[in-house]
């Protein structure tokens, strides 16, 4: 048997001669990924920590969490038809939680991030016509930015996903839509393969009613209803360039309107012409060779009519699902990480497939880089930098034990005259996790 078939004996009540066998393609794929995490944070989680930072400078707290637990099931029907599915549990439960809002005077608020009791991250039917062309329909991943495209725990060093991408965009971003994708292999002059992968998607637009200050567009893909509004459509695309003995370099983007994609009445005269056009552009890369891994991503996003959307959201009733917060017109996120596998220096450990990476990570992001054409100084804490150092130990390829120390430095709040009037506390933390990621064909 080869990688795509295995030998299977025909069922019988008698012994079947060994020479009478048939081959059967591998049909079923099962697997998943997840993390179990402990964090100790040397800063306050009080809702007033940004409005009165001097009162909470010495606070700290610890927490245990299951950020993501994902079960994957796929099936190959044959003749190019296949099914893929992922069911995810975030934080060990369904997508409803009580939170204390920093921007709502410390109110306890029930957040319903997505309707239903089970988080269905992927469910699609696919038809592969050839390696260069395939069509997929259903719940699909939107591969905008480095983290959405590569979000399994063995695809990043940190205990948590890169903070910027995970804050300002949906992550993992998924929508019900249509996708056309493929990968073409091109022959290099020295016989090595240079490959180009592409993805083009037609999906529902984001819902501007759910945009916010700290998280920008993050909750715009979620729906508290039993359906996802699709009054506005959007498009997403990605190009991956695989360079022989070099990095993978990728470009991705998104474009779509958001303001009319809500159940609320948006037809008032004062909102005539408001579209809420969202545009996002991103570049990311990964390099893995000689025991060294380097990864990085940078993205920039713009929201048109941000001031009108803020006014509209602020006017909604307190019972609405809107966050009713100031929404930035521009946001950005960038991160870079690099690590070296010291076990690669030992032949015996290489034979055991064990790895031990020591790494450093840098993150910078701001969900309110611009607000209404100028900086919203009152919410300077929405922008920050984070530096982290840590280790990743792989006793086997599917299991990783991670530990890191991270330190977030928040932007300073400045007045219109440039004078400093508030300095926020830094946010150091220690995190440790056990993660897994594995997929198996049966």
Image: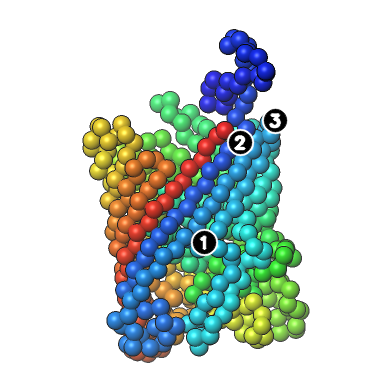
Residue 322 visible to the viewer: yes
Nearer the observer, 316 or 397: 397
The Cα–Cα distance between marks 3 and 1, rounded to whole angstroms, is 38 Å
**Crowd rating for badge 1 (residues with CA inside 10 Å; few <14, some 14–19, many 20+):** few
**Pointers 2 and 3 in contact (C-beta within 8 Å):** no
Residue at position x 25%, y 32% in the image:
347
Q: Secondary structure at mark 3?
A: loop
- Quickly name the residue at label 1: 92
Quadrant in which the N terminus is drawn: top right
Residue 140 visible to the viewer: no
Residue at position x 62%, y 78% in the image:
322
**Crowd rating for badge 3 (residues with CA inside 10 Å; few <14, some 14–19, many 20+):** few
The Cα–Cα distance between marks 2 and 1, rounded to whole angstroms, is 26 Å
Quadrant in which the C terminus is drawn: top right
Pinpoint residue 351: horizontal percent, then vertical percent: 31, 31
Which is in the foreground here, disc 2 or disc 3? 2
Q: Which mark is residue 79?
A: 3
Q: Secondary structure at mark 2?
A: strand
Pinpoint residue 363: horizontal percent, then vertical percent: 37, 63
First in sequence: mark 3 vs mark 1 = 3
First in sequence: mark 2 vs mark 3 = 2
Which is in the foreground here, disc 3 or disc 1? 1
- Quickly name the residue at label 2: 28
Instruction: Say if 35 sits above or below 408 in the image.
Output: above
Pinpoint residue 237: horizontal percent, then vertical percent: 59, 52
**Pointers 2 and 1 in contact (C-beta within 8 Å):** no
């Amino acid at each position: 048997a080869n990688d795509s078939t295995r030998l299977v004996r025909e069922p019988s009540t008698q012994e079947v001669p060994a020479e009478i066998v048939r081959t059967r393609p591998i049909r079923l794929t099962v697997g998943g990924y997840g993390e179990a995490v402990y964090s100790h944070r040397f800063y306050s989680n009080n809702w007033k920590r940004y409005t009165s930072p001097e009162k909470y400078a010495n606070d700290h707290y610890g927490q245990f969490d299951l950020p993501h637990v994902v079960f994957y099931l796929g099936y190959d029907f044959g003749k190019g038809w296949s099914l893929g599915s992922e069911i995810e549990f975030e934080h060990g439960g369904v997508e409803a939680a009580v939170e204390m809002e920093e921007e709502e005077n410390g109110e306890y608020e029930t957040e319903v991030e997505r309707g239903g009791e089970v988080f269905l991250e992927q469910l699609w039917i696919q038809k592969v016509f050839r390696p260069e062309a395939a069509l997929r329909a259903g719940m699909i991943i939107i591969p905008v930015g480095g983290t959405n495209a590569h979000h399994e725990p063995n695809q990043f060093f940190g205990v948590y996903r890169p903070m910027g991408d995970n804050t300002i965009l949906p992550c993992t971003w998924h929508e019900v839509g249509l996708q056309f994708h493929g990968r073409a292999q091109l022959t290099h002059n020295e016989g090595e393969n240079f490959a180009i992968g592409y993805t083009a998607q037609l999906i529902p637009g984001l819902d501007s009613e759910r945009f916010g200050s700290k998280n920008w567009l993050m909750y715009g893909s979620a729906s508290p209803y039993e359906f996802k509004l699709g009054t506005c459509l959007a498009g997403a695309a990605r190009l991956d360039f695989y360079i022989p003995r070099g990095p993978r370099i990728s470009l991705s983007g998104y474009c779509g309107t958001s303001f009319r994609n809500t159940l609320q009445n948006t037809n008032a005269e004062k909102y005539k012409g408001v579209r809420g056009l969202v545009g996002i552009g991103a570049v990311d890369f990964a390099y893995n060779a000689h025991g060294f891994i380097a990864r990085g991503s940078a993205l920039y996003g713009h929201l048109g009519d941000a001031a009108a959307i803020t006014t509209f959201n602020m006017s909604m009733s307190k019972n609405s699902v809107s966050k009713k917060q100031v929404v930035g017109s521009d946001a950005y996120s960038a991160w870079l990480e690099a690590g070296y596998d010291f076990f690669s220096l030992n032949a015996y450990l290489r034979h055991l497939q064990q790895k031990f990476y020591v790494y450093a990570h840098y993150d910078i992001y701001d969900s309110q880089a611009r607000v209404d054409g100028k900086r919203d100084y009152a919410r300077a804490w929405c922008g920050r930098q984070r530096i982290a150092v840590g280790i990743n130990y792989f006793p086997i390829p599917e299991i990783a034990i991670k530990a890191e120390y991270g330190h977030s430095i928040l932007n300073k709040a400045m007045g219109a005259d440039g004078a400093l009037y508030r300095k926020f506390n830094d946010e150091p933390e220690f995190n440790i996790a056990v993660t897994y990621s594995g997929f198996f064909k049966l």
